[in-house]
Image (cartoon, rainbow, N blue to C red):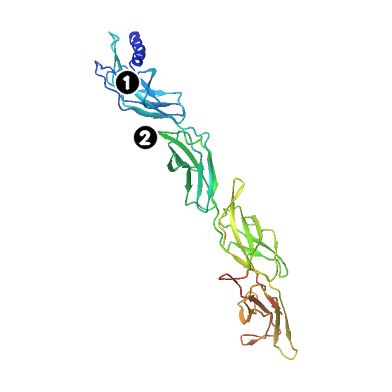
């Protein structure tokens, strides 16, 4: 055994001096085959090969460029080896030679060199930073800085570690689609270095990579999800309330414009389901308002789409009911102020405030008053109460305006 060990030690220098020119083996040793990588860390790569019949051991040569090889001066007595002290995300090329030592003569015989095997180490993701750079209703776009040595990136779902996609090293972004508005999503980006033989070197995805969890933009509000509130007929202040029925939004924002001219007059906001502060408005001036929800990401608001518009205005309407003692019939005389942009007025009457209103007169845009004596063919009665609406005809472009704060005048 001592002679055998000496022979192997001597072989180190013989092989180096011969610059890896193979010697014809009397035992006809075959060059090692079946080389494959079996393991990788950020600083090492393990590999194996098929055992060569008749071989007493093996020597390994390594190269960083696939051309100039240097002998690794450790004998491998089994068909496997691990090279260490490597850099993260590195490729090293390996060749193996089988060795036979004659116990009697201590002559060293060796095979031809094997075919080269590229082995790789895992890239180091410690310096990677993942960020969310764009958010829409149903998508989130993530980007990250390139990782040295990576040939591709595997993107995982943060919540369940399922693979979402694999992209080449030239791609450092990924867009998640089909997301539920206002919900949280995260990704894990794992850099991978893959050898020519297909071995993929990466670090355990469970711990080492920056993770970014984000909420996509909330859904667009329906016009039935929000409304304006004006506390009384004499009030000149309005507040707003919006409720995200999906409960994804952290809050909402309201924009208010004058219909004529389109000038913005207020921007208000509040938490989901909480009323905004009040804004002042002018009577007889139509306004339109819209809402959008938002979620919070990294202390900043991510807004969804704006809703459609709703409208409000407050008219100045007054009136008086009169009758004579000689008759049971009555009449109601109305007066009102012109509403900006009105092209006419419709007067409707009901005997119940929340009942069905019947149109009694359509008037021109310059009208400022009207006297009601009948509802259809029925004359007004002095002992009955009547509920009256004076509604101006208004449009916002081609859209007919419906007032969210219609005033009902009561004549008793």
Kindly identify the residue that appears in the image at 39 percent across and 29 percent down: 119
Q: Position of residue 256 (x, y in %)?
A: 64, 62
Q: In what element is the residue under mark 1?
A: strand
Left or right, residue 156 beside residue 227: left
Left or right, residue 22 beside residue 230: left
Left or right, residue 47 beside residue 345: left
Q: Position of residue 7 (x, y in %)?
A: 33, 11
Q: Mark 1, residues whose alpha carbon is within 10 Å: few (<14), some, or many (≥20)?
A: many
Cα gap from disc 2 to disc 1, whole angstroms: 23 Å
Q: Mark 2, residues whose alpha carbon is within 10 Å: few (<14), some, or many (≥20)?
A: few
Q: Position of residue 316 (x, y in %)?
A: 71, 74
Is residue 58 positioned above or below 162 on the image?
above
Q: Quadrant of residue 47?
A: top left
Q: In what element is the residue under mark 2?
A: loop
Kindly identify the residue that appears in the image at 48 percent across and 48 percent down: 176
In this view, which residue lies farthest toward the bottom?
A: 326
Left or right, residue 176 beside residue 111: right
Is residue 141 positioned above or below 102 on the image?
below
Q: Which mark is residue 220?
A: none
Q: Position of residue 366 (x, y in %)?
A: 66, 79
Q: Which residue is mark 1?
A: 97
Sooner in the amino-acid sequence: mark 2 or mark 1: 1
Residue 388 in view here = yes
**Foreground pick, 24 / 137:** 24
Instruction: Check the picture and name the quadrant holding the C terminus.
Output: bottom right
Kindly identify the residue that appears in the image at 65 percent across and 69 percent down: 286
Residue 158 in view here = no
Q: Which residue is mark 2?
A: 198
**Foreground pick, 160 / 395:** 395
Instruction: Check the picture and name the quadrant holding the N terminus.
Output: top left
């Amino acid at each position: 055994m001592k002679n055998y060990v000496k022979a192997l030690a001597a072989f180190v220098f013989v092989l180096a001096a011969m610059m890896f020119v193979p010697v014809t083996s009397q035992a006809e040793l075959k060059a090692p085959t079946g080389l494959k990588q079996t393991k990788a860390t950020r600083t090492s790569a393990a590999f194996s090969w098929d055992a060569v019949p008749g071989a007493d051991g093996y020597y390994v040569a390594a190269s960083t460029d696939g051309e100039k090889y240097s002998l690794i001066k450790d004998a491998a007595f089994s068909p496997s080896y691990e090279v260490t002290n490597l850099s993260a995300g590195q490729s090293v090329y390996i060749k193996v030679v089988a060795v036979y030592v004659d116990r009697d003569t201590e002559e060293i015989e060796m095979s031809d060199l094997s075919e080269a095997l590229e082995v790789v180490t895992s890239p180091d993701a410690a310096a990677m930073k993942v960020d969310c750079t764009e958010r829409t209703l149903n998508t989130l776009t993530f980007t990250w800085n390139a990782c040295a040595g990576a040939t591709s990136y595997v993107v995982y779902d943060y919540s369940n570690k399922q693979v979402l996609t694999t992209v080449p090293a030239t791609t450092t972004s990924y867009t998640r689609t089909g997301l539920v508005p206002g919900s949280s999503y995260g990704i894990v980006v794992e850099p991978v270095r893959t050898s020519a033989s297909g071995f993929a070197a990466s670090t355990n995805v469970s711990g080492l990579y920056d993770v970014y969890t984000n909420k996509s933009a909330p859904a667009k509000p329906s016009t039935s999800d929000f409304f304006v509130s004006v506390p009384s007929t004499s009030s000149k202040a309005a507040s707003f309330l919006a409720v995200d029925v999906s409960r994804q939004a952290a809050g909402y924002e309201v924009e208010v414009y004058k219909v004529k001219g389109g000038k913005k007059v207020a921007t208000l906001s509040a938490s989901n389901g909480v009323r905004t502060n009040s804004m002042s408005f002018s009577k007889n001036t139509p306004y339109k308002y819209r809402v959008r929800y938002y979620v919070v990401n990294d202390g900043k608001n991510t807004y969804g789409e704006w809703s459609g518009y709703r409208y409000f205005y407050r008219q100045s309407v007054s009136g008086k009911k009169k009758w004579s003692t000689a008759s049971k019939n009555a009449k109601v005389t109305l007066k009102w102020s012109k509403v900006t942009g009105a092209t006419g007025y419709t007067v409707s009457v009901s005997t119940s405030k929340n009942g069905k209103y019947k149109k009694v007169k359509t008037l021109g845009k310059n009208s400022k008053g009207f006297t009601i004596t009948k509802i259809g063919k029925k004359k007004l009665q002095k002992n009955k109460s009547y509920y009256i609406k004076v509604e101006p005809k208004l449009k916002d472009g081609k859209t007919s305006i419906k007032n969210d704060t219609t005033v009902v005048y009561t004549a008793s």
